[in-house]
Image (tube, helix red, strand yellow):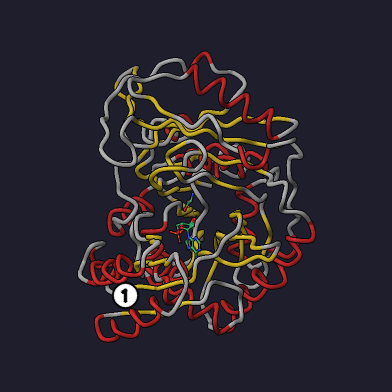
């Protein structure tokens, strides 16, 4: 069948790599894609949220499955757009309906959902222009630090953690007054949880689910988890402290109640749920839901998945995930992200990339790259994920660090300490 994949990051290159390993995938198209996805299919110059443009393309090219990488088209309702269109309905869309995508699209919706279904998460209060005073009382009567979250999508920039009551109340007003645009019309004020984060990925058909390998990502720009937040500087899988006992708690207290809640509320959901979790003294809590795979988590999770991904997506659409068994590669994987100097703030694009042909022992998943004739140029802050397998996490990290040296471009930066908190003493 012909498949259309939406998105243009490292996650989408990893999807393209995995989908085209399936004998069920005849032709892959990627909109808009990057120089890496073009190695596996045909890039199409359409944005992932240009629904009318995508409709024309899907009909003209006999597309039989749509795989949605990023959250924006999901939160804008691409699932429902297909389901309601006379000509498009029946084409499987891998991703939740707009109602399901609200789990990521609105933090207050997600918190209220977790409250209803008794899913462990930080205590909170939702504030808007009408109840600012309640929000301030909530802040000053709580503990430091204070966590403030813009309700809507803010491209990873909508969360601030502040260690001072006065600054926190000022920040609450600033966000409500537009510091993060429309996303901040409502703000979730949240209790700070102290623990260690990890990511669990489920693929669900709305009734059943399968679990993919667990991963941990490294969001801060600097070594030792310091400096500004980024989209993700690297990731590893598996995560040693996430043992069977912890996973059992995660399934019982978080995953099953979430799937139950989705069903109970009649939310159509045929796609990934990314559970951003934190273990506090061994007890799991939800930090956030995402309605898609993670990036760079996909670049370590998909290489450890042995199943045919197209088959899994067909089962997702047909509601038969209960008869699918996930097979995991026993090896560890690590991804080190090469980024442009200045990221996550101001950085240059258009730098010539070299050394990719010399890398044999790692997978190179392109993120912000663009082909220019024979050359590959940088085209974003996060440029390329160097993913390696290893018998241990440390072996995988060492291999990625070695090849992160080999690929080069002006201003290249990367963290050499991905996995540092997992491998100490190993
Ligand atoms: P989010 O955009 O919700 O993923 O939040 C960004 C980051 O902020 C998370 O990955 C956590 O590191 C941190 N964070 C969010 N909420 C909390 C919380 N309640 N307690 C501690 N850290 C948090
Ligand atoms: N790496 C975190 C995310 O994809 O949201």
Q: Residue at x 52, y 74 (%)?
A: 268
Mark 1 closeness class: few <14, some 14–19, many ≥20 residues within 10 Å: many
**Residue 144 at x, y percent in the picture:** 45, 67
The outermost residue toward the right is 244
The vertical placement of 92 against 305, above or below, is: below
**Residue 53 at x, y percent in the picture:** 28, 54
Say what secondary structure mark 1 lies in: loop
**Residue 148 at x, y percent in the picture:** 38, 67
Quarter assignment of residue 252: bottom right
Quarter assignment of residue 50: bottom left
Q: Nearer the viewer, residue 100 or 196?
A: 196
Indicate if the residue with disc 1 has its beta carbon within 8 Å of ligand 1.
no
Q: On the image, numbered disc 1 is attached to which residue?
A: 186
Q: Nearer the viewer, residue 224 or 77?
A: 224
**Residue 255 at x, y percent in the picture:** 65, 68
Q: Residue at x 68, y 57 (%)?
A: 211
Q: Is residue 87 something that shows in the picture?
A: no
The vertical placement of 100 against 360, above or below, is: below
Q: Residue at x 34, y 17 (%)?
A: 374
> Which quarter of the figure is the C terminus placed in?
top right
């Amino acid at each position: 069948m012909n498949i259309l994949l939406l998105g243009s990051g490292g996650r989408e290159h990893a999807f393209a790599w995995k989908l085209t390993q399936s004998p069920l995938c005849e032709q892959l198209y990627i909109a808009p894609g990057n120089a890496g996805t073009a190695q596996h299919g045909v890039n199409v110059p359409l944005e992932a949220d240009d629904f009318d443009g995508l409709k024309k393309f899907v009909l003209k090219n006999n597309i039989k499955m749509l795989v949605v990488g990023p959250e924006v088209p999901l939160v804008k309702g691409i699932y429902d757009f297909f389901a309601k269109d006379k000509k498009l309905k029946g084409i499987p869309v891998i991703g939740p309906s707009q109602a399901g995508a609200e789990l990521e699209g609105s933090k207050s919706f997600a918190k209220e959902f977790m409250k209803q279904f008794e899913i462990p998460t930080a205590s909170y209060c939702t504030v808007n222009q009408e109840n600012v005073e309640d929000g301030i009382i909530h802040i000053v009567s709580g503990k430091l630090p204070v966590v403030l979250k813009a309700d809507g999508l803010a491209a990873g920039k909508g969360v601030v953690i502040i260690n001072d009551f006065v600054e926190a109340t000022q920040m609450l007003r600033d966000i409500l007054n537009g510091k993060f645009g429309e996303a901040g019309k409502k703000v979730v004020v949240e209790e700070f949880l102290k623990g260690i984060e990890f990511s669990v990925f489920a693929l669900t058909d709305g009734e059943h689910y399968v679990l993919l390998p667990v991963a941990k990502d490294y969001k801060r720009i600097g070594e030792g988890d310091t400096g500004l937040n980024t989209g993700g500087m690297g990731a590893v899988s598996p995560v040693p402290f996430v043992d069977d006992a912890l996973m059992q708690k995660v399934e019982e207290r978080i995953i099953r109640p979430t799937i139950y809640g989705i069903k109970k509320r009649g939310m159509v959901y045929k796609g990934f749920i990314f559970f951003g979790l934190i273990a506090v003294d061994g007890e799991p809590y939800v930090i956030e839901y995402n309605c898609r795979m993670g990036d760079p988590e996909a670049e370590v999770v998909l290489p450890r998945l042995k199943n045919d991904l197209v088959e899994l997506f067909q089962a997702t659409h047909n509601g038969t995930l209960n008869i699918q068994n996930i097979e995991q590669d026993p090896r560890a994987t690590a991804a080190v992200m090469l980024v442009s100097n200045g990221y996550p703030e101001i950085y240059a694009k258009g730098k010539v990339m070299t050394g990719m042909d010399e890398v044999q022992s790692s997978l190179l998943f392109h993120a912000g790259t663009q082909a220019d004739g024979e050359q590959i140029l940088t085209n974003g802050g996060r440029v390329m994920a160097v993913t390696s397998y290893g018998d241990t996490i440390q072996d995988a990290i060492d291999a990625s660090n070695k090849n992160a040296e080999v690929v080069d471009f002006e201003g290249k930066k990367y963290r050499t300490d991905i996995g540092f908190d997992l491998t100490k003493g190993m």
